[in-house]
Amino acid sequence: MEAANNTDVITEAKPQVIYRCKKCRRIVASAEQVVPHEPGEGQKCFKWKKRSNNPWDQEAPQCSSIFVEPMKWMQVVEDGCVQDKLQCLGCKARLGYFNWAGMQCNCGAWINPAFQLHKSRLDECQL
Ligand SMILES: [Zn+2]
Ligand SMILES: [Zn+2]
């Protein structure tokens, strides 16, 4: 008897996505390290003027950043800082910011702790 296949887990079909530094092409994160968040939740915080009575009709803004797990290349995190810039190890480009106390995405969601990488500084590649 072979070990039972985990047919319940449907993660294999996903294409592998990685994020590279736009400047030096260094890989800074992969899709597994991205911490997803619900954009809808944060909308309450912003108290946007709602044209529709149904808040779910509102289009959430595209998140301009991704939030990831703390990683080895984030030297300032390893140094024990509470919050600081996140710089690419290769080219020292500023890729984002982190804060153990949490940060708010532009969609309104709070991420805690937050390791934010700006999508505009990254190249998203599918392997
Ligand atoms: Zn967001
Ligand atoms: Zn770089």
Image: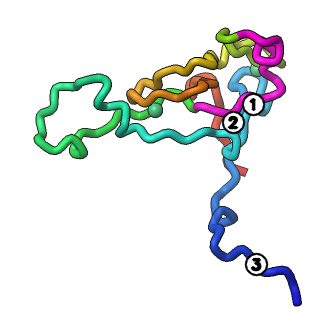
Residue topped by disc 1: 28
Seen at 65% across and 62% down, the residue is 11
Residue 36: image quadrant is top right
Residue topped by disc 3: 5
Seen at 46% across and 22% down, the residue is 104
Instruction: Provide the secondary structure element on which disc 1 rests.
Output: strand
Q: Position of residue 87 (x, y in %)?
A: 73, 14
Q: Position of residue 64 (x, y in %)?
A: 48, 27
Location of residue 57 with respect to 23 vertically, above or below? below
Please name the predominant secondary structure of the magenta segment in the image.
loop
Q: Amino acid at mark 2?
A: Tyr
Q: Label for residue 124?
A: none
Q: Within 10 Å of the Cα at label 1, are there few (<14), some (14-19), or many (20+) other Cα atoms? A: many
* Magenta segment: 67-81
Question: In the displayed structure, does residue 116 sit left or right of residue 89?
Answer: left
Q: Amino acid at mark 1?
A: Val
Is the CB–ligand 2 distance for label 2 below 8 Å? no
Residue 27: image quadrant is top right
Ligand 2's quadrant is top right
Residue topped by disc 2: 19
- Disc 3 from disc 1: Cα separation: 31 Å
Is the CB–ligand 2 distance for label 1 below 8 Å? yes
Does the segment drawn in magenta span residue 65?
Answer: no
The N terminus lies in which quarter of the figure?
Answer: bottom right
